Image (spheres, helix red, strand yellow):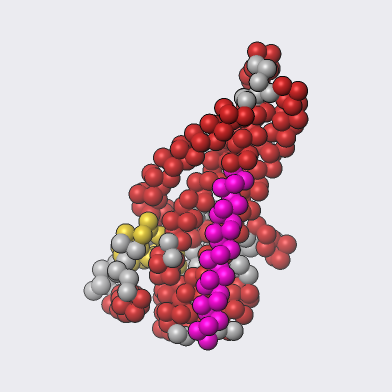
Amino acid sequence: MLPTIYNQINANKQKTWLLMTGFVLFISVAVWIFARALEFDSVSALSIVGISFIVTGIINLGSFYYSDKIVLRLAGAVLVNPSENPELYNLVEGLCIGSGMPMPKIYLIQDSAPNAFATGRNPQHAAIAVTTGILQKLERQELEGVLAHELSHIKNYDTLYMSLVVILVGVIALLADIFMRTLWYGGSSRRSNNTGAGSGGGFFLLLGIVFAVLSPLIAQLIKLAVSRQREYLADASAALLTRHPDGLANALQKLNDDTEALEVANKATAHMYIVNPLKDWGGKLNGLFSTHPPIEDRIARLKQM
């Protein structure tokens, strides 16, 4: 079992880094094309790329410190004391001891839909939130698998990865919008006064418009691909932690079979939950736009461990 788990963990890490590298390169190219389409010369365009990443870094710094509090508040999560739910607390504590992790804060969401998520910038500042529904509907071993999955997200810094990815998606959408507005309101005067683009101005203008239309969609698809890879990684890491892949596999099956939608869920936070809290409307055709891998695929991988 263990070699297969380790192989899956390594493969998922490599795919995530590849996607993240491609994401950064894609944004750099898009910003450079936007700048060239607005008739900045090559050197100035590269400077704009650098400035855009500095601004992104500043925005992400705020997300680094405050995103967990925002997400927990949006979910209506309430902090749980050990005396209020000792079984839940003891399960998390045992897994933390086994993995060498500090104890995260535990939150409860009053909702009968079974689900859970993890948040926080690092293992020292982390939280796990579970719904009342998941506590009622899962057996102890299944709940342990879910909690191990969420702890794995924390240990693997998935919450930090996804915060960065969400910011990058927002930045490329904002830049595409700024580019189109600049073309609409100020592009003609700039083109009449600026000759930096030379004869290639028309080409870059056309390319810039294409990128402005397509780049937000491409960025969103990359974000979803990264999210799916981190789910696979957390599944494999959870199996390694509990040494019992069937516990998580059975839990995923129950969560998949449950028809209740999580009332507090929204598209901005859907990727954080162990299963998509927004019930899919597109079936298999919607897979490319899903925040999570297919449950059947996740269960099959766990069964192979």
Relative side of 234 to 93, left or right: right
Based on the displayed image, in which of its 4 quarters is residue 201 positioned?
A: top right
Relative side of 296 to 139, left or right: right
- Total labels: the figure holds 0
| 195 up-or-down from 22: above or below | above
Front one among 155 and 67: 155
Task: Look at the image and say whether residue 212 sits in the magenta stretch.
Answer: no
| 185 up-or-down from 148: above or below | above
Look at the image and tell me in which quarter the C terminus lies.
bottom right
Which contiguous range is marked in magenta?
1-27
| Residue at left offset 57%, top offset 33% | 46
| 303 up-or-down from 220: above or below | below
Residue at the far front in the pictured view:
43
Front one among 254 and 289: 289
Residue 17 at x, y = what percent?
Answer: 54, 59
Relative side of 253 to 272, left or right: right
Q: Is residue 253 visible?
A: no
| Residue at left offset 38%, top offset 65% | 128
| Residue at left offset 51%, top offset 50% | 166
Residue 34 at x, y = what percent?
Answer: 64, 32
| Residue at left offset 42%, top offset 79% | 241
Looking at the magenta stretch, what is its main secondary structure?
helix
Based on the displayed image, in which of its 4 quarters is residue 196 positioned?
A: top right
Q: Is residue 215 visible?
A: yes
Residue 283 at x, y = what percent?
Answer: 70, 65
Front one among 108 and 173: 173
Residue 239 at x, y = what percent?
Answer: 48, 80
